[in-house]
Amino acid sequence: MEGTTGLSVVNQLAAFIQGGGVFMFIILGVWGFGIAIALERFRKLSKTFDVDGPSFMNEIQRYVLSNDIQGAIRVCSGSVAALPRVLKSGLKRASQGTEQIQNALDATALEVVPKVESRLNYLQLIANISTLFGLLGTIQGLIQSFAAVASADAAQKAELLALGISKAMNTTAFGLISAITIMVVHQLLSTRAEKIIGDMEQNSIKLLDLLSTKKGSAPNTDKEAA
């Protein structure tokens, strides 16, 4: 029974796509391309760029406070995520001035941010294209239906008009389905990307403040020892 139900759904979907004409296949291709991009971005943002910012920063802070900068660098080297890459560039200049550390953090951030946001704008474009192809298919269906009605017998006019409008509505519906799903996925991925970038910026400031504080406390310690 379940197999029969599944087969029936597939047949209905196939009939729905075929009933909309050539633009249905175009929208299906565009939709598939958008889903492929979304899956690739989700994998990258989840497994490659993302990291638990607070926990990672706490670990780096322990190394820095114990004056083990090389240990902190080794921790950062063990990950390819965005946050460790940025913090590593700042730690490598820990012995230099605050401005040099800030420049290193900013330069790496400018390199990493475009990779985090890569191809997300394509999803917006794909959603718009799906909607437009749906409207174009609607217009084509209406044109064909009215052209057929104009040259058809009186008995066939109602049937031809109904078929043409059905074809037009199929493309509209499918275009909107494609656009809505891609827009939802785009928003979810954009939110995740913003979180990664926000963690990166926030913890970069924390690292800069931490290194600056240690630099500022070092001379005072020397004076007290003298």
Image (cartoon, rainbow, N blue to C red):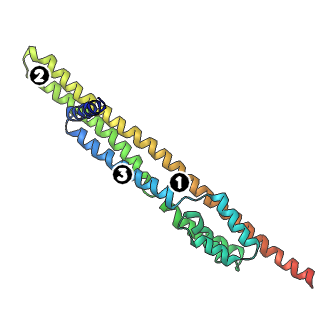
Q: Which mark is residue 36?
A: 3
Residue carrying label 2? 150
Frontmost residue, 210 versus 125: 210
Earlier in the chain: of badge 2 and badge 3, it is: 3
In the image as oriented, which residue stretches furthest toward the front? 1
> In terms of image quadrants, where is residue 198?
bottom right
Q: Secondary structure at mark 2?
A: helix
> In terms of image quadrants, where is residue 105?
bottom right
Instruction: Specify the quadrant that holds the N terminus.
Output: top left
Earlier in the chain: of badge 1 and badge 3, it is: 3
Query: Alpha carbon of mark 1 to alpha carbon of mark 2: how far?
Result: 54 Å
Query: Alpha carbon of mark 2 to alpha carbon of mark 3: how far?
Result: 43 Å
* Residue type of the residue flagged with mark 3: Ala
Relative image position of residue 16 (x, y in whole percent): 24, 32
Q: Are marks 1 and 3 in contact (CB under 8 Å)?
A: no
Q: Relative to 64, does residue 113 appear above or below in the rendering?
A: above
Frontmost residue, 34 versus 65: 65
Query: Alpha carbon of mark 1 to alpha carbon of mark 3: how far?
Result: 18 Å
For the residue carrying disc 2, how many other residues have a C-alpha within 10 Å: few (<14), some (14-19), or many (20+)? Answer: few
Q: Secondary structure at mark 3?
A: helix
In the image as oriented, which residue stretches furthest toward the top? 155
Q: Residue at 41%, 52% (x, y): give it.
A: 39
Q: Is residue 5 left or right of residue 208?
A: left
Earlier in the chain: of badge 1 and badge 2, it is: 2
Residue carrying label 1? 193
For the residue carrying disc 3, how many other residues have a C-alpha within 10 Å: few (<14), some (14-19), or many (20+)? Answer: few
